[in-house]
Image (cartoon, coloured by chain):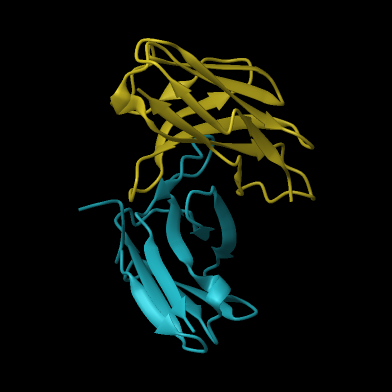
Chain colours: A yellow, B cyan
Amino acid sequence: GAVVSQHPSWVICKSGTSVKIECRSLDFQATTMFWYRQFPKQSLMLMATSNEGSKATYEQGVEKDKFLINHASLTLSTLTVTSAHPEDSSFYICSARGVASGALDYNEQFFGPGTRLTVL
Amino acid sequence: RKEVEQDPGPFNVPEGATVAFNCTYSNSASQSFFWYRQDCRKEPKLLMSVYSSGNEDGRFTAQLNRASQYISLLIRDSKLSDSATYLCVVKPYAGNNRKLIWGLGTSLAVNP
């Protein structure tokens, strides 16, 4: 299967600071990347869909000015949590969908290992 | 009504047992269906896609009932390593909007 990495794997920051999370597809080109957030004992909630070279599409209730997404290349998308507050503490997971090919199931999303954000 | 609903469990079963999970979805036009597995504090991993004719992968069998709008996952001869949360995932739209809708997950604990 395809590999997706995330960095950092965990981060602790003070309230008011900004945190950038990187999501990379290591061995395939990801035309679309998805950013999810998961609170304890809850399901994954899609935050935004990011297509390479265009603006991200945010889900209802997700503030695009607070969660900045950049998908500048086919292998990298970044999520920046601006002015983080304790309620932003969560598990942030990205996933990537590759270019349709015989090697990859076009429907399958490959997930990064997640980034655990704790805002003090 | 939630778009995807699952019984959160937990299901506690002994090793070797057969266990089944159901998941219902609200959008009758939904296109694709999946079961993912998520271990504690880890990312979800695709377990299997669910096809209209039903499909089997080793000890795992998935079925789709479009008329009743539910999918199921059957695990036979359960192992300790099967302990995880099983997430039902639905792709409601065709075309360029490839958004997935996730259930809350069903927690399974297989006991020795």
Query: Residue A72: percent from the left, percent from the top?
Result: 65, 15
Q: Is residue B20 above or below residue A110?
A: below
Residue B81, percent from left and from top: 57, 72
Q: Position of residue A87 (x, y in %)?
A: 29, 27
x 30%, y 51%: residue:
B3
Task: Write the residue at 68% across / 51% down.
Answer: A105
User: For the point 31% across and 71% down, which residue is it?
Assistant: B68
- Please determine whether, in this image, residue A106 is positioned above or below residue B72: above
| Side (left or right) of B58 relative to A114 | right
Query: Quarter-wise, where is residue B85 in the image?
Result: bottom left
Within the image, what quadrant is residue A117 found in? top left
Residue B65 in view here: no
Q: Nearer the viewer, residue B82 or A68?
A: B82
**Front residue of this view, candidates A61 and B81:** B81
Q: Outermost residue toward the left? A: B1
User: In the image shown, does A99 or A11 lie closer to the viewer?
Assistant: A11
The quadrant where residue A14 appears: top left
Point 35% across, 22% down: residue: A120
x%, y% of residue A26? 76, 34
Instruction: Judge from the rendering whether residue B58 lies leftward or rightward of residue B39; answer left or right.
Output: right
Q: Is residue B61 above or below residue A88?
A: below
For the question of whether residue A101 can be seen, the reply is yes
